[in-house]
Image: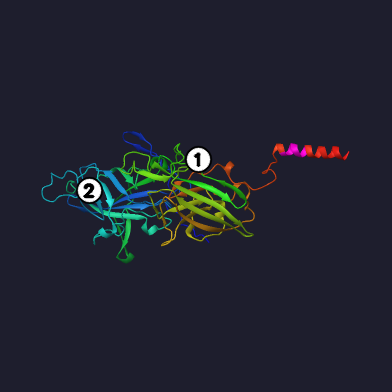
Amino acid sequence: MIPRVPEAEDSLINKIYLSEFGFQIYIHCYDPLDPNGNVTITFDILHWTNDGYVARVSIQNYYQYRQVDKPGWKLGFTWTNNEIIWSISGAIATHRGNCTTFKDAIPHCCMQTPEIVDLMPDARSSNSPENCCRGGLLSASAINPAQSSSSFDIVVGNLLQGNFSVNMPVNLTLLAPGLGYTCSPVQETRPSVSLVDGGIRDEQVFRTWKSTCTYSSYLANKTPVCCVSLSTFYSPHITTCPQCSCGCRPADKKTSSCIRYMFGSSGSEFINALDTVRCTDHMCPLRVHWHIKNNYVDHWRVKLTVTNLNYNRNYSNWNLVVHHPGFSQPATAYSFNTTLLHTYGISDDVALFWGLDYYNTELLNAEKDRVGSVSTEILLAKDHKTFTLRNGWALPRTVYFAGENCVMPSPDTYPMLPNATSKRIPISNLILFIIICFSFKILRF
């Protein structure tokens, strides 16, 4: 039986913000399979100092199936009141900046627009926050909620002594690890409260600021990164990935290796990183294949395979989302972990798959004589009122790999059930048959 994931507490809706300079519209990217998904950045002011404050910055990934992969997140923002960062615990600013005005104690960062990255696990110190130092990696919340957050402490200074009317940072940016995230303006919210002393006392911070960052594939990728192919036991026809799904193959069909860009937007060191993939008609680095294997009295069996055609990249802690009405019934995946996702306005027929620890969490890169792949067989119970092999019902509606929507074939290319009209007699054979019958009649008379 596939377990279910608890629903997120906060819902995400599209919001329109008004700026003091006019209308600015920030449309949060909406995914119907994960409507509450976002990455929330929280600044909690823990206490005041002579010239500023100490704040804990938390990054929480609320996406059910989108993780932050290597090389990890990078958080940027802009100070508005000449603030500096005296020190950071649990993270590090990538640039110190111009600190020449400070003669005695030298700040950790004097940049007006600091960029902060996470530390590796072996860099943790005794005074680091509990959720720090994960190398910038954030797990998907439905897969490993304990590893879906990160935090660090900053000591902010260079403010007037006793000036508690501090300004919030502005222009938050999040690279996770590349482009694709758009962050809302920072807003002051109800102060956070945490339990201390074994849970018998709660403490409220002085102020809390929050921003939510949402992801758009259109900003992150110039072309799709995956496609879906289909096959069934009842048809010899294999529906391949649509041609040019992720780009078009070069004219030279003899070429076995092709170059594609990993990201399609500009402004990041990840841009222009070249991907070398196996040349195919679809040119996708990843292919998902759904094969209907058997049909039993009370169950039916599917084989699900993910193939990596990328020569340069392994996919660590990969995951796969499949939207299919068959998952409304009990299902068993033999070689993958799985759970059902809660969605908005869609029945509970969306399943999330990911690898088994120490077995297949790593989707290996392709090589000259082989491709990397992971696969499982899935046994699904039948609801005899709805189950059918007709009209492509047994094939998936939507497939996501690591949160990226995979290109589906056109329904008119799906494998079809054999029937009387699927094997039409050629007109030449029909004419020949009529001539033979007519000749036989003449000979008899």
Residue at the extreme top: 22
| Residue nearest the observer in this picture, 242 or 439 | 439
Residue at the extreme right: 445
| Helix, strand or loop for the magenta stretch, by majority | helix
The residue tagged 1 is 243
| Residue nearest the observer in this picture, 94 or 205 | 94
Quarter placement of the C terminus: top right
| Residue nearest the observer in this picture, 28 or 283 | 283
Q: Of tags 1 and 2, which is closer to the observer?
A: 1
Residue at the extreme front: 443
In the image: residue 274, left or right of residue 105? right
Quadrant for residue 218, please give it.
top left
- Taking the magenta stretch, the answer to whether it contains residue 367 is no
Cα–Cα span, label 1 and label 2: 60 Å
Residue at image x 57%, y 49%?
231
In the image: residue 202, left or right of residue 165? right
Q: Residues within 10 Å of mark 1 (few under 14, many from 20)?
A: some
Measuring from the top left, give residue 196's x and y in whole percent.
Answer: 30, 63
Measuring from the top left, give residue 317's x and y in whole percent.
Answer: 40, 55
Measuring from the top left, give residue 34's x and y in whole percent.
Answer: 45, 49
The residue tagged 2 is 164
Q: Residues within 10 Å of mark 2 (few under 14, many from 20)?
A: few
Dot 1: element:
loop
Q: Which mark is residue 283?
A: none
Amino acid type of the residue that numbered disc 1 sits on in the rendered structure: Gln
Q: Tell me which segment is drawn in magenta.
A: 429-434
Rendered position, 20 above or below 47: above
Amino acid type of the residue that numbered disc 2 sits on in the rendered structure: Phe
Dot 2: element:
loop
Quadrant for residue 77, please give it.
top left
Circles 1 and 2 in contact, beta carbons < 8 Å:
no
